Amino acid sequence: MRKHFAINMPALRFARNALVFSLLGLIPVLLAYVILPPGLGTLLLGGGPPLSRFLRQVVTNGLPVVFLLNYVSFFLFAWIVATPGRSYKLSFIVLADLPVRVLGFVGLHALIYFLSADWFGSFGGSRATALRVVAPTLVRSFLFENISGVYLYATLVSALPLYVTAIENSEGLGQLAKAFPGRSGSVLFAFVIFAFYVIPLLLQNPKVLVGDDAEVV
């Protein structure tokens, strides 16, 4: 990861690498979302308005969210490891990376939904409606029930190399991870850490579990 993200790297190269990691995280999860629900893939293959709205949602909402969160996260990584003798540790994930990803994910969705109501007439053109649906939409995204779930898990997939590095540098979890074949233990613990952090944040208000959600599709 150090060779891909360094504090003294040219800005365009850093941004390019962040974009590549974002696409590598986004595309597989997006394909799974299209393939798993019956009929969605067929609908999109038919082209027309459904495909154009779907692509617009990905380009104007999904990719910017995943890219911006990854850029900030990778910059924090590069800044932390730039100090001689300092390694990327679990404490940095808990105190810096995960808060940036989760709170940034919520904030960026709120901003994009708000702007989409103006620019594209989404949510009936109502800004208030756009903001009201953010919470229930994001709760269901954790369950992979809407396209926002694609972006949520894409940020995790993109961050896996960072989390695996931190877990392997940990004396406790690093030893436990070695009980699994290859790096599967580190990957498993990375998902567990992400889940334990995200679930309480998304479910802290039980009222967000009710009501209809909407997408900017």
Image (spheres, rainbow, N blue to C red):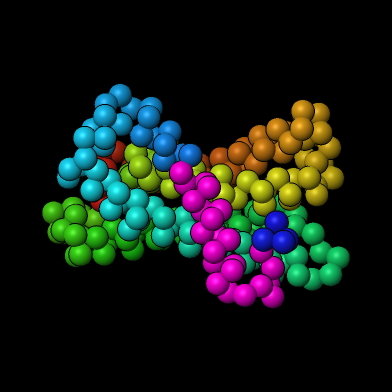
Q: Is residue 16 magenta?
A: yes
Residue 168's place in the image compared with 85, above or below, is above
Residue at x 30%, y 49% (from the top left corner): 55
Q: Is residue 160 magenta?
A: no
> In the depicted view, which residue is nearer to us: 34 or 211?
34
Quarter assignment of residue 171: top right
Report x, y in % for residue 116: 24, 60
| Residue 202 visible in rendering | no
Side of 103 where 83 appears, left or right: right
Quarter assignment of residue 4: bottom right
Report x, y in % for residue 28: 48, 39
Side of 27 where 40 appears, left or right: left
Residue at x 55%, y 72% (from the top left corner): 12
| Residue 9 visible in rendering | yes
Residue at x 13%, y 54% (from the top left corner): 124
Quarter of the image containing the N terminus? bottom right
Residue at x 69%, y 75% (from the top left corner): 8
Magenta span main SS: helix
Report x, y in % for residue 120: 19, 60
Report x, y in % for residue 48: 17, 43
Which residue reaches farthest left? 124
Side of 207 where 85 appears, left or right: right
> In the depicted view, which residue is nearer to us: 176 or 9?
9
Residues rendered magenta in the picture: 5-27
Residue 25's place in the image compared with 189, above or below, is below
How many numbered marks does the figure carry?
0
Quarter assignment of residue 105: bottom left
